[in-house]
Image (tube, rainbow, N blue to C red):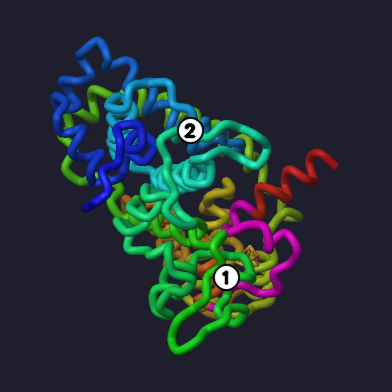
Amino acid sequence: MEYEPSAKELAHFPFLKKAGEKVRTLPPVDRLLDEKRGSVIKDLASERINQALSPGKKINSHLETLPEDEIAGYVLSRIIVSCIGDRQILDRLARYEADRAYAFLVSETGSEDGERGWNENVRFEGEFSPLAIYLAHEFGVDITRDHVPLADYVEISAPLHETRFKLVNRVVTRGRVEIQPGERYELLRERIRVILRQDLPYRNIPKSLCEKVGTLSEQIRKKYQDRMLENFGAVEEGAFPPCIRELISAVTSGANLTHPGRFSLTAFLHTIGMDNDHIAELYARSPDFDPEKTMYQVGHITGGGGTEYTAPACAAMRTTGLCIRPDKICETINHPLSYYRRKKRQKTSA
Ligand code: SF4
């Protein structure tokens, strides 16, 4: 018989299909927001997004609100970020949900430092709880096996940065990659992140609903923008990651950059606060420099065409051959912007 997650379990993993069924028994979101519990749900959604956007996340596995409200808070948080429509906020929320799910999976029965587990009804039939097996199955991962098909492994592990996940460091036997028990939740976390991100932003949210959460969305957006300014602030060239330094050195020495090179450099410099004129000036030494064309291209990447592009993550940089001479800090981050933020903070506190 198929496993039936309890209401409490669904509150911990509100993205499960069964949680969706539960929330469908509630009134529609816009009506829910007018009810007394609406403010509780708004607070839960706002707390979720704020946690996702804050650098030091706190994940409390002992939930204190009603399961239905918790699930509705999850749904509302996704609606709000969809209304905001900022790619980085969407990415962060998906990552937070995956991290949160991982934290709950490893603390079902308690943590190593003696914290009581959140799931008092958990019954293990083997190495993993029925809930963990059920959840993994819904995401297409079989955590009961110590190997995964090579194609699945390559797909799931591609964005993972740590060298232990690289295929050359894995044992591959007859088209299957061996996975240690502790790593299975890590792969599952990554799969959850990717799938939750794929659904965002929701495309069919009524305008009236976005307006209804407009004040909250604006507060969140503003807070995030302020935090970004605080993090990035004045451009600090000494904190650039090796890949970006390499691109700048190539362009200033008169080399033509490839299209992915131009795109990555422009998007990176734009995100850390460099204005379009300064970015365009960098390209002035390129042999094929054309001021008008360069301004157009820079403007297009930085939002002039309606879409503001984000600098690619390290995984994408590796794919396009732009990850050059990674250093020690690179081993601990997944994104050139994280590198910059961390190094800049180190330099400020030094
Ligand atoms: S690991 Fe990331 S930050 Fe470091 S050089 Fe490669 S792409 Fe750049």
- Label 1 or label 2, whichever lies nearer to me, is 2
Q: Position of residue 40 (x, y in %)?
A: 34, 17
* Quadrant of the image where one finds ligand 1: bottom right
Magenta segment, which residues? 321-338
Q: Residues within 10 Å of mark 2 (few under 14, many from 20)?
A: many
Residue 37 visible, this angle: yes
Residue 279 higher or lower than 254, as above or below: above
Q: Position of residue 92 (x, y in %)?
A: 46, 45
Magenta stretch: helix, strand or loop mostly: loop
Return the residue nearer the eye: 120 or 140.
Answer: 120
Question: Within the magenta stretch, is there residue 322?
Answer: yes
Tag 2: amino acid: Trp
Residue 165, which numbered label?
1
Secondary structure category for the residue under label 1? helix
Q: Which residue is outermost to the right?
A: 350
Q: Residue at x 39, y 45 (%)?
A: 90
Residue 14 higher or lower than 321, as above or below: above
Nearer-N-terminus badge (1/2): 2
Residue 312, which numbered label?
none
Please say if the residues under marks 1 and 2 sit with CB atoms less than 8 Å apart: no
Describe residue 118's horizontal placement relative to residue 210 as left or right: right
Locate the C terminus by quadrant. top right
Q: Residue at x 62, y 35 (%)?
A: 230
What is the distance, in whole Å, between disc 1 and disc 2 at their CAs?
30 Å
